[in-house]
């Protein structure tokens, strides 16, 4: 199991639907050999938690282009409640500095801003997936 | 590539050969360059690339076919483009204040961007309150719209409603007009999110019905406006979403023209007369950083549309041939790194749009990549337009790049690529089929990845991002502005009071009538939406009713 490719859920919660970024990131991670579970936009938090559970993911990537990242602390709490405290969460998109600090406090492992490099995203997610597996073991 | 023009110019061939040799000596082995749409670019264009004898067929004069040089005889000299800034934040009161400020600073046409909850078809009390008003104005009722336009004469303003189907915001505007005794014939503006196909393809931000229901409501809306609000543009065909989602400029233009053909055919199939509805078709495009390519895209688009209207619908009326378009500078080209650089980007993009002959323009604020624009940044965006118009004089000469060897050659090349996209869609059975089968989504996804690859490889330079980076990044950070939760709380109370105090029987029967209209193919669903808005139904109730009757349009995802 620990040798199998990282399992990553790429999703969008809340109201916005701009999905160019989430689709590109999903393609990057897939090309890097990861198992990517991709959802359409507009997911509800309980649905994301269920999917993370069913698909046994290591990392959840939330794309937010229009303030939906404000909901991410609620997602973090819901993941913990479902016994998924080991799952690492990253956020990508338009996240103002003030909000980034709040997300980090809430336990988000990393916030990627516009212009993040492919290698940075791929390496960070891979290393977070390793962390998640160690934490789960 | 088009055939080189044969020229009798004495000494031309020899001089050209000599230049070519010197150029090669300086450049060595040069890698070929092409633009975003894949047009290979020469280092120099000459009379060989521009056939003067085709002037009348290809260029002609502004205001008449082939329309390449502009859609009006006097273009920006006669009437400057409209400055149409997107605005919307917080409550209807906030919107009203921002609207008055922007009108005072020189804007002469306005828009309304609603909150994402509105886009998604919900009232404020149906979503997580954390998100309310963070990206647009919360407008749910006739009273909210009345507040938005307090002290502003709706009959004297051109308004763009960023309003996907079923066009409840527009319905509220009509309801307010009626309340204020303003004749609907005086209401002017555009439903600028009425292109539902573009939403299925490239913008999953909007409420929409399942494809057949969307198609139905859109045709009903066009018919209603043609009959009752004749100075309103019910349709804006949108290339902007597709290009922002990754389509190349040629693809975005091609898909947009193919969508316009689809909508025209749908209206004709519903028994409408294209001579009546085509003059009210408008378009909306993105302007990327690819400066000359964008200008050529607009020139080619104008020419193709005029030809399509004549060839496919047999119409010669110039009002129908006119390719009226609004354009917006490109949000995805802005960088978070050194954000003040975005002012230069927006300026270049705005220039391309203006030189391309647009009718109205939104310039992005430099801080849009950080959050919803601050007022100071929005003011710079408006002044960028003022500077280009009144200091740089961009509107003084019509189609100033017309006759440039490069621009004419590029316009022809873009035209060929745009037409190839239209033929691809034609072969797929038209845009409706091409979207429901996922063809368009796949093509755009492919182009988005290819562009990102060029950025990753450094082939496409983005200043501050993959070149000229600064680790200290001394850019100005916009202070974050979020609606005060207490103010949103009051907005929720206002909505609750509105729902409590309205004539419940009247609302219930208007919603029943809406459901019945959706059930009867001959009824006009949009007319029933307007009646429901007048009766006091809320945005969320109207959307929920149609959703129940016609089904919801889930995102079509082709990853």
Image: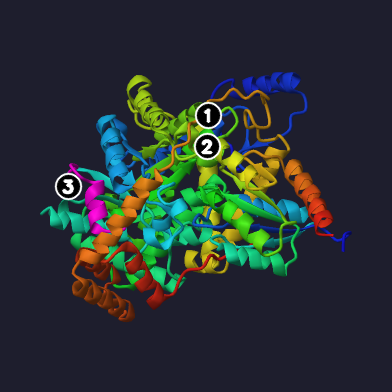
- Say whether marks 3 and 1 touch (CB < 8 Å): no
The chain that hosts pointer 2 is B
Q: Nearer the viewer, mark 3 or mark 1?
A: 1
Please provide percent x and percent y for residue B73.
Answer: 27, 37
Q: Bounds of the magenta span?
A: B137-153
Residue B338, position in %: x, y? 58, 27
Query: SS of the residue at dot 1?
Result: loop
Tell me which numbered mark, 3 or 1, is placed earlier along the sequence. Answer: 3
Q: Earlier in the sequence, mark 2 or mark 3?
A: 3
Give me the residue at 39% from left, 43% from top.
Answer: B484
Badge 2 and badge 1 both on one subunit: yes
Please report contact status of discs 2 and 1: CB closer than 8 Å, yes or no: yes
Give the letter of the chain under mark 1. Answer: B
Q: Chain of mark 3?
A: B
Position of the N terminus of chain B by quadrant: top right
Q: Residue at x 36, y 55 (%)?
A: B163
Most foreground residue, B304 or B184? B184
What colour scheme was applied to this rendering of the protein? rainbow
- SS for callout 2: loop
- Number of residues whose C-alpha sits closer than 10 Å to that of mark 3, classed few (under 14), some (14–19) or many (20 or more): some
Residue that numbered label 3 is attached to: B155
Q: Mark 2 or mark 1, which has the lower sequence index?
A: 2
Q: Are marks 2 and 3 in contact (CB under 8 Å)?
A: no
Instruction: Report which residue position mark 2 lands on.
Output: B370
- Give the alpha-carbon distance from disc 3 to disc 1, as whole Å: 39 Å
Q: Secondary structure at mark 3?
A: helix
- The relative height of residue B120 versus residue A20 in the rendered view (above or below) is below
Residue B477's disc is 1
Q: How far apart in space, not on screen, are marks 2 and 1 (Cα)?
A: 8 Å
Residue B150: name its quadrant. top left
């Amino acid at each position: 199991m620990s040798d199998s490719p990282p399992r990553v859920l790429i999703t969008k919660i809340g109201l916005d639907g701009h999905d160019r970024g989430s689709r590109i990131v999903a393609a990057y991670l897939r090309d890097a050999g990861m198992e990517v579970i991709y959802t359409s936009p507009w997911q509800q938090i309980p649905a994301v938690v269920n999917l993370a559970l069913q698909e046994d993911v290591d990392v959840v990537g939330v794309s937010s282009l229009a303030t939906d990242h404000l909901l991410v602390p609620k997602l973090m709490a819901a993941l913990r409640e479902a016994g998924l405290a080991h799952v690492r969460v990253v956020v990508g998109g338009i996240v103002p500095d003030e909000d980034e600090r709040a997300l980090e406090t809430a336990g988000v492992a990393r916030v990627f801003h516009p212009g993040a490099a492919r290698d940075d995203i791929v390496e960070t997610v891979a290393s977070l997936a390793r962390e998640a597996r160690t934490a789960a073991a | 590539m088009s055939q080189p023009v044969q020229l009798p110019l004495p000494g031309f061939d020899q001089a050209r050969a000599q230049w070519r040799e010197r150029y090669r000596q300086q450049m060595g082995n040069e890698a070929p360059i092409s633009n975003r749409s894949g047009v290979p670019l020469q280092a120099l264009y000459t009379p060989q690339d521009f056939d003067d004898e085709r002037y009348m067929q290809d260029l002609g004069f502004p205001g008449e076919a082939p329309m390449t040089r502009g859609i009006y005889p006097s273009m920006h000299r006669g009437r400057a483009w409209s400055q149409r800034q997107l605005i919307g934040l917080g409550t209807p009161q906030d919107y009203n204040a921002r609207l008055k400020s922007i009108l005072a600073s020189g804007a002469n046409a306005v828009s309304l961007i609603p909150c994402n909850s509105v886009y998604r078809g919900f009232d404020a009390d149906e979503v997580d309150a954390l998100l309310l008003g963070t990206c647009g104005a919360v407008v749910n009722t006739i009273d909210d719209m009345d507040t938005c336009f307090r002290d502003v004469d709706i009959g004297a303003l051109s308004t763009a409603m960023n309003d996907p189907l079923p066009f409840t915001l527009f319905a509220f505007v009509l309801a307010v007009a009626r309340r204020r005794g303003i004749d609907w014939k005086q209401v002017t503006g555009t439903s600028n999110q009425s292109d539902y196909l573009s939403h299925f393809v490239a913008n999953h931000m909007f409420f929409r019905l399942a494809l057949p229901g969307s198609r139905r409501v859109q045709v009903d809306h066009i018919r209603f406006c043609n009959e009752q609000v004749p100075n309103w543009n019910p349709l804006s065909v949108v290339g902007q979403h597709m290009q922002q989602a990754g389509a190349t400029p040629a693809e975005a233009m091609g898909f947009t023209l193919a969508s316009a053909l689809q909508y025209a055919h749908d209206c004709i199939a519903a028994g409408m007369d294209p001579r009546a509805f085509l003059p009210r078709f408008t378009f909306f495009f993105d302007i990327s950083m690819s400066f000359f390519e964008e200008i050529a895209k607009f020139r080619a688009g104008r020419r193709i549309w005029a030809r399509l209207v004549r060839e496919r619908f047999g119409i010669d009326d110039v009002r129908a041939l006119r390719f009226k378009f609004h354009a917006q500078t490109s949000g995805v080209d802005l960088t978070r790194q050194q954000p003040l650089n975005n002012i230069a980007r927006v300026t270049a993009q705005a220039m391309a749009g203006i030189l391309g002959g647009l009718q109205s323009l939104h310039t992005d604020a430099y801080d849009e990549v950080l959050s919803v624009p601050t007022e100071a940044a929005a003011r710079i965006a408006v002044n960028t337009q003022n500077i280009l118009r009144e200091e740089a004089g961009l509107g003084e000469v019509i189609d100033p790049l017309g006759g440039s060897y490069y621009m004419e050659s590029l316009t022809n090349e873009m035209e060929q690529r745009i037409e190839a996209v239209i033929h691809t869609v034609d072969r797929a059975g038209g845009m409706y089929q091409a979207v429901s089968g996922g063809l368009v989504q796949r093509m755009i996804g492919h182009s988005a990845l290819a562009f990102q690859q060029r950025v990753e490889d450094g082939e496409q330079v983005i200043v501050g991002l993959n070149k000229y980076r600064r680790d200290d990044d001394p850019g100005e950070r916009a202070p974050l502005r979020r609606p005060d939760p207490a103010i949103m709380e009051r907005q929720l109370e206002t909505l609750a009071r509105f729902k409590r105090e309205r004539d419940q029987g009247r609302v219930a029967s208007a919603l029943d009538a809406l459901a019945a209209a959706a059930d009867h193919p001959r009824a006009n669903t949009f007319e029933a939406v307007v009646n429901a808005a007048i009766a006091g139904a809320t945005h969320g109730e109207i959307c929920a009713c149609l959703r129940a009757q016609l089904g919801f349009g889930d995102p079509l995802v082709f990853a």
